[in-house]
Amino acid sequence: MKITIAGIGYVGTSMAVLLSTKHKVICYDVDNKKLNLIKKRKSPIEDPEIDKFFKTKKLDLSATNSPKIAFKDSDFIVICTPTNYDPSTNQFNTSSIERVINEVIRNNNNEVPIIIKSTIPVGYTKKVRKIFSYKNIVFSPEFLREGSALKDNLYPSRVIMGSKKLYAKKFAEILIDAAELESDKIPLLLMSSNESEAVKLFANTYLAMRIAYFNELDSYCSDKKLNAISVINGIGYDKRIGNYYNNPSFGYGGYCLPKDTQQLLKNFGDVPNNIIQAIVDANSTRKDFIASLIIKLKPKIVGIYKLAMKEGSDNYRDSSIQGIMKRIKAKGIEMILYEPLLKEKTFFNTEVVKDLDVFKKRSSLIVANRSHIELKDVKDKVFTRDIYMRD
């Protein structure tokens, strides 16, 4: 089959590599830099499994910025474009999805099935079907982690389609067939579009809730001089709670959790709730608490160690440490930043120090959301709430 992937980010790149092992896949994007990397068999995202596939697998994979080439005669079109949260409208900005649908209509006359993988509000699929008078649009949520997106596609926890129509089942079969996990071990759930959209938002909000919960536990332990490791280990052996998503941090962040929790809260509207609002509010409360601890130490120069959310990730969008930076800067405390991902000399009016040794020497206090072995020699300078040395 010819399958077009629109949007070459974490979701799109991993999806393109997965499907190109068995089908003809065309990547479509307006970012020529990303397209050129695909053509050179280099990953535009940090993902060791994708790097491995580019080196070892025969992939029927091409890339273009031409809508005509991308969408003409496609059997399926998968939209993976970004839907960032827009604070001015208090919901996702879905304009990138609508632009792609317009291009599809202009360049494909067969009402080709469109699979939306971008995260969207509840009710969005029904709305765009009506707006474009286009029936064959379905939402299929993805459940990928940064740094292991392809692996999560190869070994999916489940495949969900927001439709029970034949084309939706067919695409689900394509995903399952391309996976390395045995098909009988991959749950397939077919449901309404609204239900599939709700699954995505509620799943990520639950994960955000766990992060917020253990962060508040850590705040309590810090204030009351308790050993957080002892408390977390003590409750984690209960199998109903488990030993996951329990490592304290400066707050949840990244591509998904901040925007998905806010969108779900928006979707609630007049529906009574306490927990969802609390999850959103808890992230700001945690950052306030962490910043207050740092400010009380009265550091002369605060060194911010990396913006990225976790090891092996190149994503620092909405990273929690940026919230800490803003709060510290508001108090007039001098800051410097060490982040190898940045080529710029400054980041939000903060000097970027390229040399790690120089960064260590200049910093009177090093603030790290996630600690690292390369800070071992200056551990007495390091402020972190990372107690397990893992993500």
Image: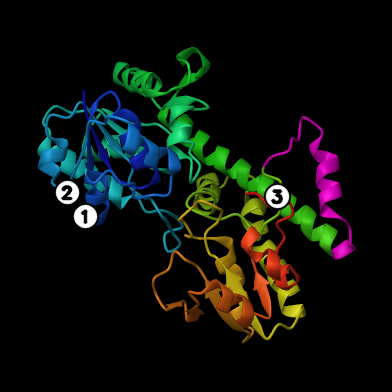
Q: Which mark is residue 101?
A: none
Say if 320 sits above or below 57 in the image.
below
Which of the image's four quarters has the N terminus? Answer: top left
Question: Mark 1 highlights which residue?
Answer: 32
Tell me which amino acid carries mark 2. Answer: Asn
Question: Mark 2 highlights which residue?
Answer: 65
Tell me: 133 left or right of 361: left
Say if 282 sits above or below 150 in the image.
below
> Is residue 291 one of those drawn in magenta?
no
The span picked out in magenta is 223-244
- Contact? badges 3 and 2 (CB < 8 Å): no
Query: How many residues crowd mark 3 within 10 Å: few (<14), some (14–19), many (20+)?
Result: many
* Extreme residue toward the top, this view: 184
First-in-chain label (2 vs 1):
1
Say if 189 sits above or below 252 in the image.
above
Q: Residue at 52% of width from left, 41% of height from top?
A: 201
Give the quadrant of residue 234: top right
Position of residue 197 measured from the top left corner of the image (x, y, whole percent) = 45, 36
Q: Residue at 69% of width from left, 62% of height from top?
A: 286
Tell me which amino acid carries mark 1. Answer: Asn
Tell me which amino acid carries mark 3. Answer: Asn
- Contact? badges 2 and 1 (CB < 8 Å): yes
Q: Is residue 326 visible?
A: no
Front in this rendered view, residue 196 or 253: 253
Mark 3 lies on a secondary structure that is loop
Front in this rendered view, residue 33 or 132: 33
Tell me: 268 left or right of 1: right
Whole-number angstrom distance, CA of label 2 to CA of label 1 = 7 Å
First-in-chain label (3 vs 2):
2
Question: Mark 3 highlights which residue?
Answer: 247
